[in-house]
Image (cartoon, rainbow, N blue to C red):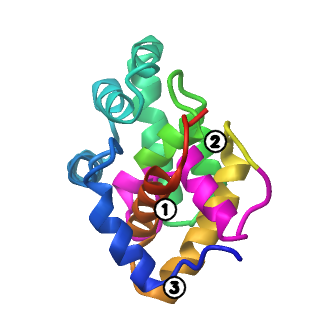
Amino acid sequence: MSLSIDAEFVDEYLGVYDETQGVLPERLEEFGDTFRKQGHLTRDDLYEIAYESSTRSAHHVERNPRGVCVEITENVLRLEDEGDDFSQIALISSLRGFKAPTASCVTTALSPERHAVVDTRVWASLERAGRVDGRKETFDAFDYCVMIDEIRDVSDETGHTPAEVGYALFAHDYDVRDGTLH
């Protein structure tokens, strides 16, 4: 029997999310405010987001040219109006220190009503629910699109934002996984 992801599931696991070491929604909200106000993110902003998501890879962000960080995030903001998820994640992932999971923090900061933070835990919960096939430990823009389509379906079914659904899926895996993550 597969996992059922309904409104009750999302409510329950949103309550568990605070126990995890996941990215703090409040921090992403702050980054989103900065992003929308400035019209871009700076290399320093991106470093902070990467550090929140993955302290191990954050130092790579400092190797990106400052102007390129601004240019890429301006383009990501422009693409938000077009709903081009693949291009947004691919653009952000072209920066050092950003793979699809960390890139999803940037899009979620920008628009939590359209995006979700995704990673191995989110994929595992979607796999348990029969919404994606097979185990995965690394992700690219194509995988993000697969996950966000499923997350948006759950969002439509439950009335929760995609960001909330993503946090609940993360917390579910945190709660039920036996053993280590990788």
Nearest the camera: 14 or 143?
Answer: 14
> Which is nearer the N-term, disc 1 or disc 2?
2
Residue position marked by numbered label 3 in the rendering: 156
Q: Amino acid at mark 2?
A: Ala
Question: Which residue extends farthest right?
Answer: 133
Residue depicted at 66% across the width and 64% down the height: 128
Q: Position of residue 142 (x, y in %)?
A: 73, 50
Q: Residue at x 79, y 53 (%)?
A: 134
In this view of the protein, which residue sits in the foreground, 147 or 113? 147
User: How far apart are labels 2 and 3 at the CA level?
Assistant: 25 Å
Label 1 vs label 3: CA separation?
15 Å
Q: Considering the image in quadrants, where does the N terminus appear?
A: bottom right
Q: Which residue is mark 1?
A: 169
Residue shown at 46% from the left, 15% from the top: 60
User: In x, y percent, where is residue 44?
Assistant: 28, 25
Q: Which mark is residue 117?
A: none
Q: Tell us which disc is closer to us: 1 or 2.
A: 1
Whole-percent x and y of residue 91?
59, 39
Mark 3 Cα-neighbour bin, 10 Å: few <14, some 14–19, many ≥20:
few
* Crowd class of label 2 (few under 14; some 14 to 19; many from 20; radius 10 Å): some
Please tell me in which quadrant of the rendered image residue 10 appears: bottom left
Query: Considering depth in this image, is 62 or 22 the residue closer to the camera?
Result: 22
Find the residue positioned furthest to the front: 178
The three-letter amino acid code for the residue at tag 1 is Leu
- Height in image: 65 above or below 33? above
Boundaries of the magenta span: 107-134
Q: Which mark is residue 90?
A: 2
Q: Amino acid at mark 3?
A: Asp
Going from N to C along the chain, the mark reached first, 1 or 3, is 3
Determine whether, in the image, residue 23 is placed left or right of residue 178. left
